[in-house]
Image (tube, rainbow, N blue to C red):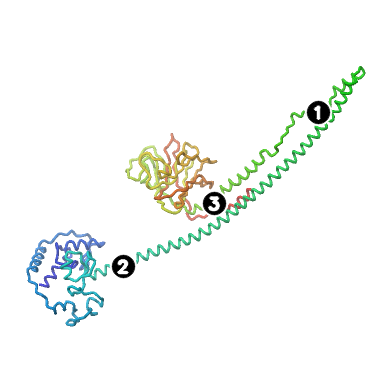
C-alpha cells in the first residue's frame, strides 16, 4: 500500500493528486501544481526529468487515472488507523543511521544537517516541506492535515529558489549601490566644477566691471576735457567778438561826437563837412547774424553716454557669444517624430527636415498626432539637464520653434503659450519675431535670424533662443518649474501663395566641440 501511495502523490505538493494530468514526457502532476510551476518559469519543463518543451503543452485531466486516485482516497478513509505505540512515535524522530538511539537534536547524518528546529514538534517527523501560503516549515503529515490543498514545495527546492533570489537581490543591491556611488561621484565632481566655474565667473565679472569702470572713467575724463576745451574756445571767441564790438562802439561814439559838434555849430560854411560826415559812416558788422549760445555742451554728454551704451551692448553681444559657446557643449542630436506630425506635414526620412505640403496625407489618427495644426515634436524626451539644438529657418516668413510639454493638446485648435504647455517664439508674415505669450511680445532685432539656437535648462526652468550665426540673444523664458517631460516643438506654418515653402531644417552640431570667447579683450578694444 505504501508503494502504491507513492505513485499517487504529486512530487510538487507531495499530496494525493488533485485533477491529475500527464505531460508529454510521461510524468504526472496535479493540474494546478504543474500550471503554477510553469507560470514561474521562462520555459515549460518537467520538474522531475527537466525535459524542456518547445511550447507549453495543453493539459487535460486524465479521467481514468483520476478515478484510480479517488478509489485510493476512499480506501484510505475506510482503512482503520492503528494507534501508534510510543516507540513508533519516537522512531519518527530518528534517522536510519541513529535508529534506536533517541537524540535531543538530529545527528549529522540525517536531513537536518545539525540545524536546530528541523523536527516537527507535533508529528516528530523531519521538516522537509515548505508551505508558501502560510510561510512555514512542515512535515509530510502536516501537509496532509492542516496544510492540505495549500501550495507546498520541498524545502530543498524552496532553499534553492530563495538562494537564487538571494543572489539576484544581492546583485541588484550591488548594482544599486554602484549606481548611487557613481551618482555621488558625479555630484561631487559637479560641485567641484561648479565651484571652479563660479570662481571663474566671479573673477570674470570683476574684470568686466573693472574694464567698464575704466571705460566710464576714460569717458568722464574725455568728456570733461572736451567740455573744458569747448568752454575755452567759446570764451576766446567771445573775447574776440567783444573786442570787435568795443572797437566799433568807440568808432561810432567818435563819429557821434563829431556830428554832435557840427549840429551845435551848424552854418553855411560847415554844410559840406556835415554832408561828408553823414556819407562816411564807419564800417560795421551785421551783428544780428552772429549767433550767441550760452550752452556749449549741448549733445556732448549724450554722445559720451551713447558711446558707453555701445560698449555695454557690445559686451552683451560678446557675453551672448560666450553663452552660445558654452551651450554648444550641451548639444543633442534632435530628430523629428513622424508619429506626432500633422497630415499636412512632410517629414524627411532622416527626421531632420519638415515642410508643409499642399495635400493632407491620410494618416492614422493616433493620440500623439496633431490632427489640425501643422505641428510636429521631436523624438527626444527631456526630464532633466541641459540641452541645445539649432534649427535653420532661412528666409521663411512664418514659423514656430520651442519646446512643448508631453500633455499638450494635439487635437483641433491649439494655443501656443506657457500656460498651455508651450515655450516658443514665432515669426509671422515676414515681420519681427514674437514671444508666444499673452499678449504677444514683439522682439525687435537688427536682423532676422537664419539659424535659431534653442537652449533648455530643465532644472533652472528656462528656455532661451539665440541667433546661432551672430551669437546674439533673442529671448528667454525663465522662472518656470517644469513638472513633466518636454519635447522639441516645430511648426513650419502653411504655404502662402507659393511663399514659405522652405522646410525647417535641424542642423548637425559637433557635440564634442568646445569654444571660447575672450570677453575682456573684446571690451578693451572698444574703449
The secondary structure type at the circle numbered 2 is: helix
| Residue nearest the viewer, comparing 133 with 309 | 133
Vertical comparison of 358 with 178: above or below? above
Earlier-in-chain disc, 1 versus 2: 2
- Image x and y of residue 127, in percent: 21, 72
Q: Residues within 10 Å of mark 3 (few under 14, many from 20)?
A: some
Residue that numbered label 1 is attached to: 284
Residue that numbered label 2 is attached to: 166
Q: Residue at x 23, y 74 (%)?
A: 118
Q: Quadrant of the N terminus?
A: bottom left
- Image x and y of residue 122, in percent: 18, 73
Name the outermost residue toward the bottom: 101
- Residue 105 placement: quadrant: bottom left
Distance of label 3 from label 1 (alpha carbons)? 66 Å
The nearer-to-camera label among 3 and 2 is 2
Task: Find residue 421 and name its label.
Answer: none
In contact (CB < 8 Å): disc 3 and disc 1: no
The secondary structure type at the circle numbered 3 is: helix
Q: Residues within 10 Å of mark 1 (few under 14, many from 20)?
A: few
Residue that numbered label 3 is attached to: 322
Vertical comparison of 155 with 227: above or below? below
Amino acid at each position: 500500500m505504501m508503494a502504491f501511495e507513492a505513485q499517487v502523490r504529486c512530487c510538487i505538493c507531495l499530496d494525493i493528486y488533485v485533477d491529475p494530468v500527464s505531460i508529454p514526457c510521461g510524468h504526472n502532476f496535479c493540474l494546478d501544481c504543474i500550471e503554477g510551476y510553469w507560470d514561474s518559469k521562462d520555459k515549460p519543463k518537467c520538474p522531475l526529468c527537466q525535459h524542456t518543451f518547445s511550447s507549453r503543452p495543453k493539459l487535460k485531466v486524465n479521467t481514468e487515472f483520476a478515478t484510480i486516485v479517488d478509489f485510493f482516497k476512499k480506501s484510505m478513509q475506510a482503512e482503520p488507523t492503528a494507534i501508534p505505540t510510543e516507540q513508533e512515535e519516537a522512531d519518527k524522530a530518528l534517522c536510519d543511521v541513529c535508529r534506536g538511539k533517541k537524540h535531543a537534536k538530529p545527528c549529522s547524518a540525517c536531513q537536518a544537517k545539525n540545524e536546530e528546529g528541523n523536527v516537527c514538534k507535533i508529528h516528530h517527523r523531519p521538516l522537509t516541506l515548505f508551505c508558501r501560503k502560510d510561510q512555514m516549515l512542515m512535515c509530510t503529515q502536516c501537509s496532509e492535515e492542516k496544510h492540505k490543498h495549500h501550495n507546498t514545495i520541498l524545502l530543498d527546492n524552496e532553499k534553492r529558489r530563495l538562494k537564487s533570489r538571494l543572489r539576484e537581490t544581492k546583485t541588484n543591491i550591488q548594482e544599486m549601490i554602484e549606481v548611487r556611488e557613481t551618482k555621488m561621484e558625479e555630484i561631487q565632481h559637479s560641485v567641484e566644477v561648479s565651484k571652479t566655474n563660479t570662481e571663474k565667473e566671479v573673477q570674470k565679472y570683476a574684470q568686466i566691471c573693472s574694464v567698464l569702470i575704466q571705460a566710464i572713467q576714460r569717458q568722464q575724463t574725455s568728456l570733461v576735457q572736451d567740455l573744458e576745451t569747448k568752454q575755452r574756445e567759446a570764451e576766446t571767441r567771445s573775447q574776440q567778438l567783444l573786442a570787435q564790438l568795443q572797437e566799433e562802439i568807440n568808432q561810432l561814439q567818435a563819429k557821434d561826437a563829431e556830428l554832435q559838434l557840427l549840429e551845435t555849430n551848424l552854418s553855411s560854411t560847415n554844410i559840406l563837412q556835415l554832408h561828408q560826415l553823414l556819407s562816411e559812416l564807419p564800417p560795421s558788422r551785421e551783428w544780428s547774424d552772429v549767433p550767441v549760445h550760452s550752452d556749449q555742451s549741448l549733445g556732448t554728454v549724450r554722445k559720451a553716454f551713447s558711446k558707453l551704451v555701445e560698449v555695454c551692448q557690445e559686451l552683451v553681444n560678446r557675453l551672448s557669444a560666450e553663452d552660445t559657446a558654452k551651450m554648444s557643449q550641451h548639444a543633442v542630436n534632435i530628430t523629428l517624430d513622424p508619429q506626432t506630425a500633422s497630415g499636412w506635414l512632410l517629414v524627411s526620412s532622416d527626421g531632420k527636415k519638415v515642410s508643409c505640403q499642399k495635400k493632407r496625407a491620410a494618416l492614422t489618427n493616433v493620440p500623439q498626432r496633431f490632427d489640425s495644426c501643422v505641428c510636429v515634436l521631436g523624438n527626444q524626451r527631456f526630464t532633466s539637464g541641459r540641452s541645445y539644438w539649432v534649427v535653420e529657418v532661412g528666409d521663411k516668413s512664418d514659423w514656430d520653434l520651442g519646446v512643448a510639454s508631453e500633455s499638450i493638446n494635439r487635437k483641433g485648435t491649439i494655443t501656443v503659450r506657457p500656460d498651455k504647455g508651450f515655450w516658443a517664439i514665432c515669426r509671422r508674415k515676414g515681420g519681427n519675431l514674437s514671444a508666444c505669450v499673452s499678449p504677444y511680445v514683439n522682439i525687435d532685432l537688427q536682423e532676422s535670424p537664419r539659424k535659431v539656437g534653442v537652449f533648455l535648462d530643465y532644472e533652472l526652468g528656462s528656455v532661451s533662443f539665440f541667433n546661432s550665426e551672430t551669437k546674439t540673444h533673442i529671448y528667454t523664458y525663465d522662472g518656470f518649474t517644469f513638472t513633466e517631460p518636454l519635447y522639441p516643438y516645430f511648426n513650419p506654418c502653411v504655404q502662402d501663395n507659393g511663399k514659405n515653402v522652405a522646410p525647417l531644417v535641424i542642423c548637425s552640431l559637433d557635440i564634442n566641440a568646445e569654444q571660447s570667447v575672450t570677453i575682456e579683450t573684446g571690451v578693451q578694444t572698444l574703449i
